Structure formats: C-alpha cells, structure tokens
C-alpha cells in the first residue's frame, strides 16, 4: 500500500491594502456583479470577475430559479461566458465575492462549489495554463495560484475511454 499526501497552498491576506492593483480591479468588478445577482431564494449573492489574457475583464453572478436545479452559480456564468465569447483567450484570474442576506459581505472567503470547481478545472486543462483564484471576504482574502489545487482528485477527459 502506498500513501499519498495532498496539500493546498493558499496565500492569505488580511487587507485590500496588501493586494496588487490588478486584484483590486477584479474584486471591484466581482463586488458589483454580486450586488446585481438574482438570489431571491437563498439571499446569497455571489459575483465573479475574470481577467482574460487579452486584458478584458468580464463578470457574472448567480442566477436562481424556483426550480432550484435550474439556477447557476456566478463562477460557471463567467467561465461559460468567457469560453463562449472569447474562445481563443485564456482565463488568467478569477475573483469571487459573496454577500449573505443580499447585503452583508461574508467575513471569510467563500470557495467555489464542487460543480464550479470541476468547470474551472476543465477550463484550465483546456487552456493548458493555470487559473488563479482570488476569494474575498471582509476579514480574509485568499489567493490560490492554480485551480487544480481545489480539486486534486478530479474527473477529467483522460478517464474517459
């Protein structure tokens, strides 16, 4: 029997003042997107902003529906939009912001759900370049340099016969 250790490395910041200017622009865009999310059921607004390799910043937010499985997370909205509208461009960085009760920013960063992790990872594999994630909370900010760290044992195209 072999044992394998899987580790996650996260850069942790305590203040926006510690962040580079390009991160701040992404977080501002993600915050604006979160405030415009459609979340009448959960009251949990999430915004995402992606920096593409052409310098373009695009955003998305969660969109809920009374038929719960029909809604979609902010992360998938922005990744699918990037891949549909800018298929030749790579996603370099993805910033995420969440508000609870529709108005109060979460204190701790909120990571992507499992479905979003899979979608982000597949985009990363497709573009053959890491996607950096910035997860923003009012008390902590996490930066993860490579989306694969969020899903170390993933389902991928190499598993399909």
Image: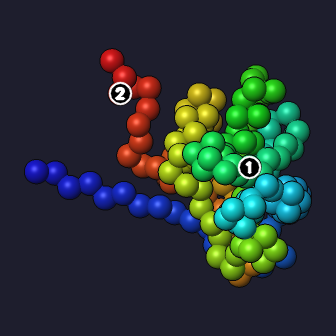
Q: Quadrant of residue 47?
A: bottom right
Q: Helix, strand, or loop for circle 2? A: helix
Q: Which residue lies furthest to the front in this view?
A: 66
* Point 52% across, 63% down: residue: 9
Q: Which of marks 1 and 2 is nearer the N terminus?
A: 1
Look at 52% across and 42% down and name the residue there.
118
Image: 75 above or below 96:
above
Residue at 20% across / 55% down in the picture?
3
Give the image quarter of residue 101: bottom right
| Residue 96 coordinates in the image, percent (x, y) | 72, 58
Q: Residues within 10 Å of mark 1 (few under 14, many from 20)?
A: some
Quadrant in which the C terminus appears: top left
Residue 92 visible within the image: no
Q: Which residue is drawn at 88% across and 39% down?
A: 56
Taking 111 as reference, is 2 above or below it?
Answer: above
One can see residue 17 in this view: yes
Which mark identifies residue 63? 1
107 vs 9, nearest the viewer: 107
Residue on which the image places disc 2? 159
- The spot of residue 62 in percent (x, y) is 73, 52
Element at label 1:
loop
- Disc 1 to disc 2, C-alpha distance: 31 Å
The color scheme shown is rainbow
Q: Where is residue 111 in the image (x, y as percent from the top left)?
A: 59, 61
On residue 130, the disc is none
> Does 117 appear above or below 36?
above
The image quarter containing residue 13 is bottom right
Relative to the observer, which residue lies in front, 44 or 88?
A: 44
Q: Which percent across, then down, holds residue 68?
A: 60, 50
Q: Which residue lies furthest to the left in this view?
A: 1
Q: Residues within 10 Å of mark 2 (few under 14, many from 20)?
A: few
């Amino acid at each position: 029997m072999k044992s394998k250790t899987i580790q996650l490395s996260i850069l942790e910041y305590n203040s926006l003042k510690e962040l580079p200017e390009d991160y701040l622009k992404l977080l501002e865009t993600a915050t604006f997107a979160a405030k415009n999310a459609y979340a009448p059921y959960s009251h949990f607004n999430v915004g995402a902003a992606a920096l593409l390799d052409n310098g373009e910043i695009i955003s998305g937010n969660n969109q809920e529906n009374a038929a719960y499985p029909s809604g979609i997370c902010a992360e998938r909205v922005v990744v699918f939009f990037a891949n549909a509208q800018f298929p030749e461009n790579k996603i370099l960085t993805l910033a995420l912001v969440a508000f609870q009760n529709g108005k109060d920013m979460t204190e701790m960063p909120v990571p992507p759900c499992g479905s979003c992790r899979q979608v982000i990872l597949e985009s990363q594999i497709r573009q053959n370049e890491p996607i950096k994630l910035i997860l923003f909370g009012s008390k902590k900010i996490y930066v993860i340099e490579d989306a694969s760290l969020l899903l170390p044992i993933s389902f991928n195209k190499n598993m399909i016969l």
